[in-house]
Amino acid sequence: MNMVDVYRAVHTSKILEKLASESDGEVRETVFRTKVAVDEDIFEQIKLAMHPLLKGALATTAAAVPLGIAGYTVMAKADETSDVLQNRILQTALALAGIGAGLYGLNKLTSQQPKMAADDNALLDEANEKLATVGMIDELLSALPEDVSEDATKLASEIRALNRSYGVHLLSELADR
C-alpha cells in the first residue's frame, strides 16, 4: 500500500459514510459495515507497512513536519503502559501522523493553492496530536487482557471502530486541504 492507495481508501471511506447517511434500513447498515471494514483495512495496512509508508510520507513533505511532537504527546499520555505497548503506540501514532502529513503534502503538491507555511505548520501540529491520540487509543483497545468480559470486549470493539472512523476522517480532512 502506497500513499495513493491510502488516499483512495480514505476517499472510499468518505463516500461510504455519505452513502450511509443518505440510506435507510438494511442498505444503511450494509454500507456502514463496509465503511467500518474499509477503515479497519486502512489502519491495518498502515500498521503493516509502517516504515515504508512513514518514509514516503516524510519524503512527500520534505520531512518538514515535526513528528516528534506526536511522539512526545503519546509518550506523555502512555506513561503507565508497558515498554512493548509504548513502542507499538508510538509506532502507530507516528505512522498515522506521517500518513496524514503525506496526504496533506500530496494535496499541496497537486493543488493550485498558495502555500502558507505558518498555517500549514499549525494545522499539521494539531492533526499530528489528534492522530497520535487516535493511534494510542487504537493500540490500547487492541491490547485488552483476554479475561475481559464479553460485554467489555464488544464495547471496546465498538469504541475502536468509532476511533478508527475518526482517524480516517482526520486523514480525509488533511487530504482535502
Image: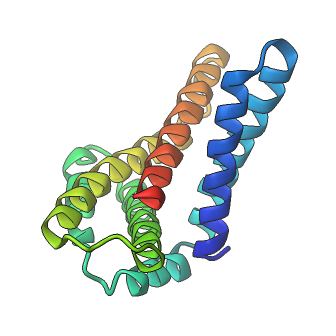
Task: Decide which of 136, 104 is in the foreground and name it.
Answer: 104
Task: Decide which of 77, 107 is in the foreground and name it.
Answer: 107
Identify the image's colour scheme: rainbow, by chain, secondary structure or one colour. rainbow
Task: Name the residue at 19% across, 70% down.
Answer: 116
Quarter of the view holding residue 91:
bottom left
Task: Name the residue at 83% across, 27% down.
Answer: 30
Q: Is residue 31 above or below residue 150?
A: below
Quarter of the view holding residue 137:
top left
The location of residue 40, given as percent across then percent down, is 66, 47
Q: Is residue 77 above or below residue 176?
A: above
Q: Is residue 118 visible?
A: yes
Task: Name the residue at 21% across, 53% down.
Answer: 73
Q: In this view, does 157 lie to the left or right of 60?
A: right
The location of residue 3, given as percent across then percent down, is 58, 74
Task: Decide which of 148, 77 is in the foreground and name it.
Answer: 77
Q: Is residue 19 above or below residue 177?
A: above
Q: Quadrant of the C terminus?
A: bottom left
Q: Residue extending furthest left?
A: 118
Q: How many marks?
A: 0
Q: In this view, does 121 lie to the left or right of 49?
A: left
Q: In this view, does 96 lie to the left or right of 157?
A: left
Q: Can residue 145 be seen in this view?
A: no
Q: In which quarter of the image is the N terminus?
A: bottom right
The location of residue 69, given as percent across then percent down, is 20, 63
Q: Is residue 139 left or right of residue 61?
A: right
The location of residue 15, given as percent across then percent down, is 68, 43
